[in-house]
Amino acid sequence: MLGGLTGLTDPKGTDWGERMLNTVASQTIRHLFTKSESVEVFVRCYPSSKLLQGSIDSFKMSGRGLVIRKDFGVEEMSFETDAVAIDFSSVLSGKLSLKQPTQAIAQVVLSETGINQAFKAELVTRGLMNLTVPALTALSDGKPVSFPEIQVQLLPENRLRIFAKADLGNGEPIPLHMVVTVAVERRRRISFKNPIVELEQIPEAQKEISKTLSLALVEILDNMVDLDRFDLDGVKMRLNRLETEGQRLIFSGYAEIERIPQKG
């Protein structure tokens, strides 16, 4: 019976195996995201008889308006593989499982709005609140120091302007303004380098401490953004480059896919 089914094509010439895989893969991929505006999946498997052996020619996914782990918005995401070995029995049960790990070329686009929203996520804020490192508590008479407000503005040439506030526990927030350069390190970390502290709009009495706190915040951010903390189960992102383009931050690289996760 399966042999007969794999020979079927629709009037447009789309092979039955490809149609079934596209349906199953689309359902699987959508479940990875908390929300999705659109997710399109294109699986190539011709002839469909190869599907019985678990072999497909290529796999492409493109999505827009995605939300990962409830708080991290992605404007666009796409990835593409070459030939992939899958478990055919999983397809029949409405799932997609790999027989062996694979790699996919990937691109992720973040918007300025999405980045600022991510700075409000609990996974991020817990690394910015009630900090007790000596370099900070030396400025606050031993009290924990927090950075409760951070907003970024994307600039050309892979730079960010950061507006933030520091709370030293005395009820008087310290404004922080700076420009940093962002880059990829070891294919998994986003580094924040070459800070230029801007003090023109900082009150005179706060300029010195604002400069010190600005440099401290850059160091904290430089050690915070590690992609391994945001990976989906079974999928690791590795970056080759990033680029600011208007109000978008574009990452290019690849995904190491050990297994297809069942949820985000």
Image (tube, grey):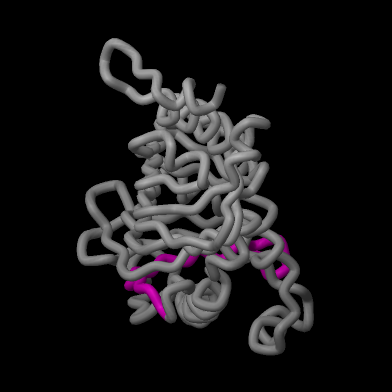
The image shows a total of numbered marks equal to 0
Q: Is 15 inside the magenta-drawn segment?
A: no
Query: What is the magenta range?
Result: 167-185
**Residue 188 falls left or right of residue 13:** right
**Which sits in the foreground, 63 or 47?**
47
Looking at the image, is 199 positioned above or below residue 65? below
Q: Residue at x 39, y 62 (%)?
A: 254
Q: Residue at x 49, y 53 (%)?
A: 85
Choose top left, top right, bottom left or bottom right for residue 197: bottom left
**Which sits in the foreground, 41 or 63?**
41
Choose top left, top right, bottom left or bottom right for residue 140: bottom right
Majority secondary structure of magenta residues: strand
Choose top left, top right, bottom left or bottom right for residue 174: bottom right
Residue 200 point in image, percent of width and height: 33, 68
Q: Is residue 222 visible?
A: yes
Q: The C terminus is located in which quarter?
A: top right
Q: Residue at x 47, y 66 (%)?
A: 176
Residue 61 point in image, percent of width and height: 40, 40
Residue 57 point in image, percent of width and height: 36, 47
Q: Is residue 34 visible?
A: no
